[in-house]
Amino acid sequence: MRELIREFRHLHEEKITRLDLHHHPSVTPEEKLQMKVYALQSYVSDLADQNQVLVEAIEDLEKEAKHKGSRVGIKLCTSDCTVHVS
């Protein structure tokens, strides 16, 4: 997962760097700036998607931990609890 995140970052940084270094005579400064805005919007969108995936993964892990914790609690109680009937 980390490698994928690094790759996304690298691709976006490379795209922005190419826009900065590319000097095409038919592209106005305003158009170049607009292309950078699009590139940055794309980067932000990818980051939002990554955050959503991470949030969902954390939620899944929390559910799993609660489920395992409740199972452990039941096992502990059944093996360690003594029932006294009077």
Image: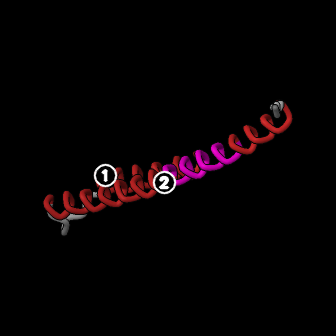
Residue ID for mark 2: 8
Q: Is residue 15 left or right of residue 77?
A: left
Is residue 2 positioned above or below 52 on the image?
A: above
Residue 78 appears at what percent x and percent y? 82, 39
Q: Is residue 34 left or right of residue 68?
A: left
Circle 1: is it few (<14), some (14-19), or many (20+) Cα within 10 Å? few
Q: CA distance from mark 1 to mark 2?
A: 20 Å
Disc 1 versus disc 2: nearer the observer: 2
Badge 2 element: helix
Q: Residue furthest right?
A: 79
Quadrant where the image shows the C terminus: top right
Q: Amino acid at mark 1?
A: Leu
Residue 69 appears at what percent x and percent y? 69, 40
Badge 1 element: helix
- The main secondary structure of the magenta stretch is helix
**Residue at screen point 25% across, 62% down:** 35
Residue ID for mark 1: 21
Question: Which span is picked out in magenta?
Answer: 54-68
Residue 28 appears at what percent x and percent y? 15, 63
Q: Are marks 1 and 2 in contact (CB under 8 Å)?
A: no
Let me know if residue 83 is in the magenta part. no
Q: Is residue 83 left or right of residue 43?
A: right
Circle 2: is it few (<14), some (14-19), or many (20+) Cα within 10 Å? some
Between residues 4 and 16, which one lies in front from this camera angle? 4
Between residues 55 and 1, which one lies in front from this camera angle? 55
Q: Is residue 23 left or right of residue 49?
A: left
Residue 50: mark in rendering: none
Q: Quadrant of residue 2?
A: top right
Q: Earlier in the sequence, mark 1 or mark 2?
A: 2
Q: Residue furthest front?
A: 86
**Residue at screen point 39% across, 54% down:** 48
Q: Amino acid at mark 2?
A: Phe
